[in-house]
Image (spheres, coloured by chain):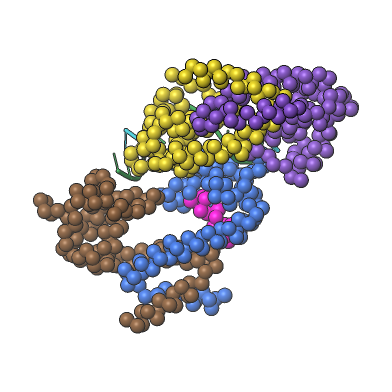
Chain colours: A yellow, B purple, C blue, D brown, E cyan, F green
Amino acid sequence: MTHNWNENQPIYWQLCERTIERILEGSLDEADPLPSVRQVAAELQINPITVSKAYQLLVDEGIVEKRRGLGMFVKTGARKQLLLSEREKFRSQIWPDILARMQRLDIDPASLLEPLKKNATNK
Amino acid sequence: MTHNWNENQPIYWQLCERTIERILEGSLDEADPLPSVRQVAAELQINPITVSKAYQLLVDEGIVEKRRGLGMFVKTGARKQLLLSEREKFRSQIWPDILARMQRLDIDPASLLEPLKKNATNK
Amino acid sequence: MTHNWNENQPIYWQLCERTIERILEGSLDEADPLPSVRQVAAELQINPITVSKAYQLLVDEGIVEKRRGLGMFVKTGARKQLLLSEREKFRSQIWPDILARMQRLDIDPASLLEPLKKNATNK
Amino acid sequence: MTHNWNENQPIYWQLCERTIERILEGSLDEADPLPSVRQVAAELQINPITVSKAYQLLVDEGIVEKRRGLGMFVKTGARKQLLLSEREKFRSQIWPDILARMQRLDIDPASLLEPLKKNATNK
DNA sequence: GTGGTCTAGACCACT
DNA sequence: GTGGTCTAGACCACA
């Protein structure tokens, strides 16, 4: 599987974001090893250094820990930490921006909820 | 006042976005002249070339027109055009992404949108 | 002038340390621009990316700031901040280690002060 | 007890240093056997190969000797040898570096060493 | 096996 | 001019 990279953001950054998403979703659990730099590089057809940079970012943010000679592992408590920090970011930055945008575009909130109801009934 | 530039996006792009916002809000009306490149550069403490680049982007998108010797002006119909294109962008790109994010963070979209509907009916 | 790199530490780290030393000594003052990545790379005969990595570290530590399109600059207050943090590091980590080492090696503190007196008279 | 490894230095190197410290302090005496590789590995929760590498370093430096079938032993004269070499290292490398650091941080060496001299005379 | 560093060189984005 | 990103490939250190 080849991936669709967003041209406007560095690959390493997108890789970082995807990993965070996977931790939040639970498809990458705490204490799980991250796929090795070489493996990811081969799969995604990118340079190992690019992967390495993404992983380093995660280490710097305290989400992932390096065990020397063994690889990278999701830190214990990482999911909880991410939930808190990402929710705060959403609340203080993303949602206000969305609200302003909806106001500017005069978008009706009801129209946004319609498609959700369908999903709800499908559950 | 010095402005808060987002470090992650080009200044010219942010300048461009702000102008679009002002047109949508109406604080910059159709046929209004845009403030001159020099003036903006001086006010925001940025390079005139950066301002020019932002203005050129607006020209390229057909939102603004250059009248030789007079300056830049908001095009007639620009607001309507922007409303349509920005709404489409919101519907197809921004909102789905926000929904996915809310799902990951276990935030209920309805709870955030309900209060807005009431306001809308009060109008 | 070619530089003597310590083989045991990454070049980018040594470059980072040297810059900090220069700021502490005052040979690189606050608000001064750091020499450009390309210039340093050419002078020291190393890869620009290596220099870049060193500069990025300084940015991450809040000692240096990037002005887009202009280059890197020593932050206002950087020297004071460094004095505080480095003194604390010396007090809590380096000096206790030195003391333990002297004790183990049964080194007489007086013998360490002798050469200093000479310097003092030279002043 | 899990040990606090310094992230910046190889574990085998830190293990090596600790052993040298123990010999200097006397808690590991000449002709004493070093704890077995397995035992150390189990205690410190590290890879036996890492322990082996540390021990090999000590053999290479002539501080420890391997007796086939019996294990590793501190060499006769090791403590004296270490005192000489470590003192020389301290005098020529470590102390000058510390002095330069103190100068940069505007710390007076005498003020740190004076209290020690008194203790020394009390002995 | 793991990740880290460095090189040489290309290309891009920003000001 | 400035820094940032990515590639391809080599070499090293660690466990």
Q: Residue at x 76, y 27 (%)?
A: B123
Which one is in front, A65 or A116?
A: A116
Is A61 situated left or right of C76 in this image?
left
Is B31 situated left or right of A67 in this image?
right
Question: In x, y percent, where is residue A68?
Answer: 35, 43
Is B14 situated left or right of A12 in this image?
right
Q: Residue at x 24, y 55 (%)?
A: D58
Q: Residue at x 67, y 26 (%)?
A: B117
Q: Residue B83 sits in which quadrant?
A: top right
In terms of secondary structure, what is the magenta stretch mainly? helix
Question: In x, y percent, where is residue C69?
Answer: 66, 39
Residue A58 vertical placement versus D1 (above, below): above
Which one is in front, A19 or C96?
A: A19
Q: Residue furthest right?
A: B69
- Give the position of the N terminus of chain A as an image quadrant: top left
Q: Residue A55 sits in which quadrant?
A: top left
Residue D111 vertical placement versus A93 (above, below): below
Please provide the residue range marked out in magenta: C14-25
Q: Residue at x 45, y 39 (%)?
A: A80
Which one is in front, C25 or D26?
A: D26
Question: In x, y percent, where is residue D13?
Answer: 31, 52
Which one is in front, D6 or A120?
A: A120
Membership of C18 in magenta stretch: yes
Residue B60 is at least partly visible in this image: no
Is B31 situated left or right of D9 in this image?
right
Question: In x, y percent, where is residue C46?
Answer: 51, 43
